[in-house]
Amino acid sequence: MTELETLHRRRELVLLSAELQRATLARRIARVETSPVRMALGFAKRAVTVPLAFKIGSKVLQLAVRAFRRRSKRGRLFAT
């Protein structure tokens, strides 16, 4: 493979990379610009799939476990 062929190959790879980056950015921008109504409907759909009481209960349980772990760690650190 000559040096000129290598340079052409590199150029093709750079152009392909730029095209992929452009596509990724376009997809991300489209995602950000989604309709607020569609976002609200998506949130409502997710909220309905898991009962609200279960969500709140699991969050309270997580906080309690985290607080218990912190307390038990503190006790072990200062134990004599």
Image: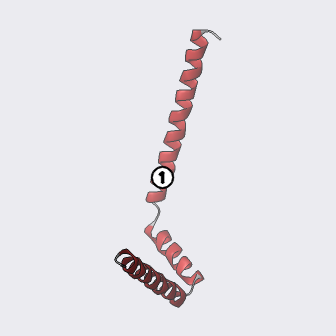
Nearest the eye: 54 or 73:
73
User: The C terminus appears in which quarter of the rendering?
Assistant: bottom left
Q: Label 1: how many residues lie within 10 Å, few (<14), some (14-19) or many (20+)?
A: few
- Left or right, residue 5 beside residue 14: right
- Left or right, residue 75 beside residue 51: left
Query: What's under tag 1, amino acid-wise?
Result: Arg
Please name the residue that numbered disc 1 is placed on. Answer: 28
Please, is residue 60 above or below residue 43 in the view?
below
Residue 34: give x, y in percent of width and height: 47, 62
Image quadrant where residue 10 sits: top right
Image quadrant where residue 67 sits: bottom left
Nearest the eye: 4 or 39:
4
Q: Residue at x 44, y 79 (%)?
A: 69
User: The N terminus appears in which quarter of the rendering?
Assistant: top right
Residue 70: give x, y in percent of width and height: 40, 78
Please, is residue 55 above or below residue 31 in the view?
below
Nearest the eye: 25 or 34:
25
Coloration mode? secondary structure
**Helix, strand, or loop for circle 1?**
helix
Residue lying at the far right in this picture: please name it.
1
Q: Residue at x 51, y 84 (%)?
A: 58
Q: Residue at x 54, y 88 (%)?
A: 54
Q: Residue at x 51, y 79 (%)?
A: 44
